[in-house]
Image (cartoon, coloured by chain):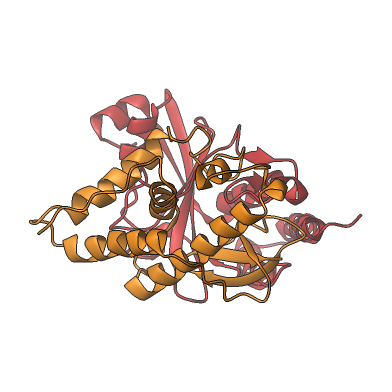
Chain colours: A orange, B red
Amino acid sequence: VTKTKLPDRATDEGVEVRVLMAEISTPSFASWTLDKAREAMQLMDAVLWNRFRDPKPFGAAGAMTLADVVKAPGQFQGFESYPSYAASVVNRIQNVLDIANNDSDKRQANFKAHVQAALERANAAEISDPSAGTLVGWRTSGTGSPSAKMTFYKTVLGNDFYYW
Amino acid sequence: VLYQGAVRDAKFVLLQSSFEAMNRAPGGLVRAALKTIFLMVMWGHMGSHGQPTPQLFVPSSDPAFADFREPLVTYLRAKGPRNLNTVCLIGERYPDGSAWVWAIWDEGQRMVLWEGAEATMTGSRRDLDLRRDVVANEAAVGGSTYRVSRAYVTQLRSQCAKTGTTVQLRRGDVMGGQTK
């Protein structure tokens, strides 16, 4: 099976695929399905690019790249020093890739599909925002709202998504 | 200005007061029953923004989370265990069937999400440093995808102390893979 590799971390696609893999539950999560993972990736993609279009409220005024958005202080865990990112995130992503590329691992098919879905979403030319406004945030379910200005949209795979 | 988080904070104060009243009720069984019913009702109404809210469970009551010791020991070993490590674990189950456990490590000042038997704690999608990632209130979360309010952490700690599972592991237990 062809080995899966991530795009260069300096590219927008490289940034996005790493955020998606860090933030979305993997196939190890009992509630994971490929459809749910794809939907969560679609919504996170919308959040990231909506923030890029209007970066100032999210600590990223003047952002020229997606990296400028994800390294805004306190916004995306482990990405503040991007292109360096937290060891815990590196390990999480590497663990997913290792399983996806291990032909003798029974979990390979789901993990490979998971990574492939992240790559496809990161490479998609257009964003798809199905909310009633502009998706601008997400939170681990149960941990509260990201801002009083944001409205809850829906929960997908353990993340609550918000728009304004 | 009454920010939306204040509603949640006020509910927590109410929750605390009610618990104190129940603690004064006579009879251990009656107290336990009152607390269980109250928790189920209150927790289901804690959300102030329309988000689904969890039902709490004890990790040992769910086969997917009962064997938490090995991933916990691996996590503590990776983070650097203290001489004594006190960890409280509490499960959250959501209406869509999703479930996970939060492990709150007192001495290490960390709070890590564990997504069950097939997952690890070291590779968690949410591993919070309680000294850096906790802000004064919900208004100060400021759009963050991961920072949490002090009230949220206090609330979870309180619920965990009352209905979760607390384990204590010494450094030697962690490094040797044995639990107390």
- The one nearer the camera, B55 or A124, is A124
Q: Residue at x 31, y 31 (%)?
A: B174
Q: How many marks?
A: 0
- Residue at the extreme top of the image, as rendered: B83
- Relative placement, left or right, of A33 versus A142 is left
Q: Quadrant of residue A11?
A: top left
Regarding residue A8, the answer to whether it shows in the image is: yes
Rendering coords of residue B45 (x, y %): 69, 71
Image quadrant in which the N terminus of chain B is located: bottom right
Residue A124 sits in quarter: bottom left
Q: Please provide percent x and percent y for residue A159.
A: 52, 63
In this orientation, does residue A29 appear?
Answer: no
Identified at 60% across, 45% down, the residue is: A75
A50 relative to B164 in the view: left or right: right
The front one of B134 and A119 is: A119
B16, above or below B132, in the image: below
Quarter that holds the C terminus of chain B: top left
Which residue is depicted at the point 81% across and 56% down? B6
Point out residue B159 in the picture as x, y percentages from the top left corner. Answer: 61, 54
Q: Residue at x 66, y 58 (%)?
A: A144
Task: Please name whichever residue, A110 or A140, is drawn nearer the observer in this view of the structure.
Answer: A110
Q: Observer-nearest residue: A16 or B130?
A: A16
